[in-house]
Image (spheres, helix red, strand yellow):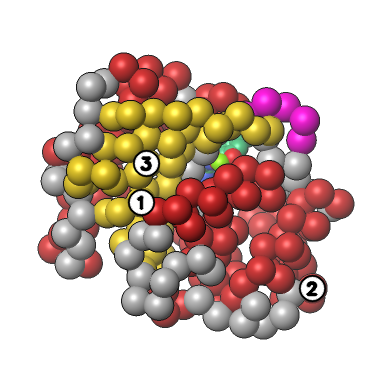
Amino acid sequence: NYYRDVNRLLHAVQKNATKGDPRSVVKAIDNFCRQKEWAMNVGDEKGCILDSVVSEVNPVTVLELGTYCGYSTVRIASLLPPRAKIITLEFNPDYAKIARQVIAWAGLEDKIQVVEGPSGEWIPKMKEQFGVKTFDLVFLDHWKDRYLPDTKLLEDCGLLRKGTILLADNVICPGTPDYLEYVRNSPRYKSQYFKSHLEYTKAEDGLEKSVFLG
Ligand SMILES: Cn1cnc(CNC(=O)c2cc(-c3ccc(F)cc3)cc(O)c2O)c1
Ligand SMILES: [Mg+2]
């Protein structure tokens, strides 16, 4: 079952990656998913686009929606400046458990806070629970039908500021049509599509980068 798969992914990290070396953790997961078992990590091709956006934004406060095994969490956190933090929300407790161990293997616990539960419940509590004012970068990679409602929730909770970047995975496959329509047509966003491929496959997919205009 799916949990055994992610457990094997964790063992591949612990076997093949160097403890405390985030890039070797990313490499070990990509090798495992290419050679052994496909998994829904953002992957190395879209991961390079993610890296370039993170490096350009140089965020101090990051929100990730959808931790899964922590692949993109580690990828983002490895590029953050010293005091920067990433809060990552995961609904599924089994995935969260695996992600914490992958993050620990990478030695990035101090930069990452894994929060378990529904994004719709946690987003309104971000300010009071975690002392967040606004996010500099939001990476959307959770349930595809939650991208739009959670984006509206982030707006309503005042968690976005002029210039906040939203980066959304899977806008083609599995696809997030209502979210795409919203960020591409709303006067409050400036959107750009980065064409790529579904992780570890030749199928088309891509990332949508949207700047909140306030
Ligand atoms: C259960 N669950 C926990 N987290 C989530 C949210 N992520 C996804 O659903 C997700 C799905 C796919 C995907 C799956 C099957 C397929 F044929 C093609 C694509 C790819 C991704 O990059 C994703 O992020 C779902
Ligand atoms: Mg994804």
**Dot 1: element:** strand
Give the residue pinned by disc 2: 16
- Badge 3 amino acid: Leu
Q: Which region of the structure is painted magenta?
A: 201-205
- The residue indicated by pointer 3 is 166
Q: Amino acid at mark 1?
A: Leu
Query: Distance from label 1 to label 2 (Cα)?
Result: 30 Å
Among all residues in the image, which is located at the extreme right?
A: 35
What is the distance, in whole Å, between disc 1 and disc 3 at their CAs? 6 Å
- Label 1 environment density (alpha carbons within 10 Å; few <14, some 14–19, many ≥20): many
- Outermost residue toward the front? 56
Instruction: Give how far apart the Cα atoms at labels 2 and 3 are.
Output: 32 Å
Q: Which mark is residue 137?
A: 1
Residue 195 at x, y percent in the picture: 61, 29
* Quarter residue 113 falls in: bottom left
Dot placed on the residue nearer the N-terminal end, 2 or 3 = 2
Q: Residue at x 86, y 52 (%)?
A: 35
Q: Residue at x 37, y 41 (%)?
A: 166
Q: Amino acid at mark 2?
A: Asn
Q: Residue at x 45, y 67 (%)?
A: 80
Q: In the rendering, which numbered label is found on residue 183?
A: none
Q: Earlier in the sequence, mark 1 or mark 3?
A: 1
